[in-house]
Image (cartoon, rainbow, N blue to C red):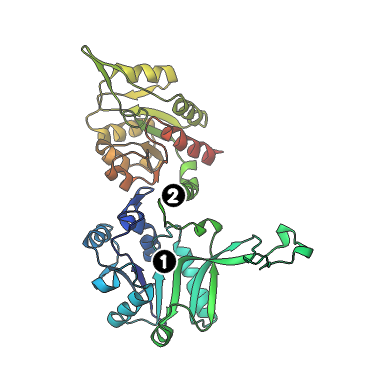
């Protein structure tokens, strides 16, 4: 049997995006996406994170995955240190036949990518493998020379194979190749083609929003079958349906700001046959008035134990908790979210809520998050 070991390099000291490797994106630390995919693939005998930073090591441990930490020497954690030097350091410490170097800056990688690339690698006895995406563009050299097509016989796009562009998601390297050449690629090289969207890597701050959008889109596609079975949507109010602002006069609370687009989203969900309920710890007549305006019959205010209220309400409706979607933003939603089949939150929700949410909307509370999630439900119901 060929022994595959994964190396996940994560040094501290990122200058373009501070603490990039552990910064939350779409509800998880950046590193969690690739690590979870590697763990769930079943390809690797060991998965080793090489880091010089204790903050990164602690963040990885908190993920509670079957991952080891290897302390990286300081001389291998400088801006000029190569990835190959980190690979060679691991080779001194760990036994393997094939080393798979995974870059967490490509979080769109999936468990299936690791499985299919391993099968490709073994089937043809390759020495190394790189990941790539197909680019159907015409390229030119600086001197005006065409690189990948003949301008006098310009191909139709549908007939143009294009080029494979290395996307840096992961690399396979046999031990013998690494020891003899000190390079991750060489010998008989395989290319494993990934989905076009995986071309986006997180190197600069402007990349962050695009990758987060893609991760959330992928999540929404993954949850299509679950959302299609929903029977109840429960929505928190302050910080979810509103922007968390509470406007007071000397006589008490007088105003809350709601979003009309969120309201339309709830109407569209109800039109699919899904029940909608509002639930808040606040004893606010404003929430009751808003529910009446929207025609929402189920409105629970002053709820001190949302978990118990949700369980009781589902029992009265004859709805299984697995058929409930819950949208919340703060720690008092945690238990009720955790027991629901689908868990979602706004972009500005508290970190504990983002961690338990299956979907983190790119929109803030009161600014379109509820509408965004409602549209996912409606699409799944069609």
Residue occupying image coordinates x 53% and y 79%: 189
Mark 2 lies on a secondary structure that is helix
Left or right of 188 on screen, residue 357:
left
Q: Which residue is mark 1?
A: 41
Q: Which residue is mark 2?
A: 206
CA separation in Å, label 1 and label 2 = 30 Å
Mark 1 lies on a secondary structure that is helix
**In terms of depth relative to the viewer, which is nearer, 373 or 297?**
373
Q: Is residue 134 visible in this depiction of the protein?
A: yes
**Location of residue 135 by image quarter:** bottom right
Q: Is residue 72 visible in this depiction of the protein?
A: no
Residue occupying image coordinates x 30% and y 55%: 19
Check disc 1: other Cα within 10 Å, few if <14, some if 14-19, many if 20+. some
| Residue 287 picture location, percent across and down | 33, 20
Q: Is residue 370 above or below residue 95?
A: above
In the rendered view of the protein, which quadrant contains the N terminus?
Answer: bottom left
Q: Residue furthest right?
A: 152
Left or right of 211 on screen, residue 191:
right
- Depth check, mark 1 against mark 2: the one in front is 2
Q: Which of the labelled discs sits on residue 363, or is there none?
A: none
In the rendered view of the protein, which quadrant contains the C terminus?
Answer: top right
**In terms of depth relative to the viewer, which is nearer, 304 or 238?**
238
| Residue 177 picture location, percent across and down | 43, 85
Q: Is residue 6 above or below residue 382?
A: below
**Location of residue 280 by image quarter:** top left
| Residue 150 picture location, percent across and down | 74, 67
Q: Residue furthest top?
A: 251
Q: Earlier in the sequence, mark 1 or mark 2?
A: 1
């Amino acid at each position: 049997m060929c022994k595959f070991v994964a190396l996940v390099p994560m040094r501290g000291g990122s200058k373009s995006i501070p603490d990039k490797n552990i910064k939350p994106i779409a509800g998880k630390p950046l590193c969690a996406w690739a690590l979870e995919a590697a763990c769930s693939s079943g390809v690797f005998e060991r998965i080793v994170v090489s880091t010089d930073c204790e903050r990164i090591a602690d963040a990885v441990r908190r993920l509670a995955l079957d991952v080891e930490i290897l302390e990286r020497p300081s001389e291998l954690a400088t801006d000029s240190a190569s990835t190959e030097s980190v690979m060679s350091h691991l080779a001194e410490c760990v036994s393997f036949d094939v080393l798979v170097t995974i870059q967490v800056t490509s979080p769109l990688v999936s468990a299936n990518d690791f499985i299919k690339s391993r099968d490709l690698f073994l089937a043809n006895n390759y020495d190394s493998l790189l990941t790539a995406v197909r680019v159907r563009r015409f390229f030119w050299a600086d001197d005006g020379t065409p690189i990948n097509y003949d301008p006098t016989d310009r191909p139709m796009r549908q007939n143009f194979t294009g080029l494979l562009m290395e996307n840096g998601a992961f690399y396979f390297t046999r031990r013998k190749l690494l020891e003899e050449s000190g390079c991750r690629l060489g010998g008989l090289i395989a290319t494993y083609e990934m989905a076009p969207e995986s071309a986006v890597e997180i190197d600069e701050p402007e990349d962050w929003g695009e990758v987060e959008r893609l991760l959330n889109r992928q999540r929404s596609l993954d949850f299509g079958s679950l959302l299609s079975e929903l029977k109840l949507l429960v929505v928190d109010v302050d910080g979810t349906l509103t922007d968390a602002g509470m406007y007071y006069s000397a006589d008490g609370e007088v105003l809350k700001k709601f979003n009309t687009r969120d309201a339309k989203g709830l109407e569209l969900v109800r039109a699919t046959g899904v029940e909608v309920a509002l639930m808040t710890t606040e004893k606010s007549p404003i929430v009751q008035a808003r529910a009446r305006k929207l025609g929402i019959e189920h409105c629970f205010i002053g709820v001190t134990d949302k978990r118990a209220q949700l369980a009781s309400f589902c029992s009265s409706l004859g709805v299984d908790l697995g058929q409930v979607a819950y949208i919340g933003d703060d720690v008092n939603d945690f238990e009720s979210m955790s027991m629901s089949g689908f868990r979602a939150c706004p972009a500005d929700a508290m970190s504990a809520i983002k961690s338990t949410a299956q979907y983190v909307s790119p929109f803030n509370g009161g600014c379109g998050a509820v509408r965004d999630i409602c549209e996912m439900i409606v699409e799944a119901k069609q």
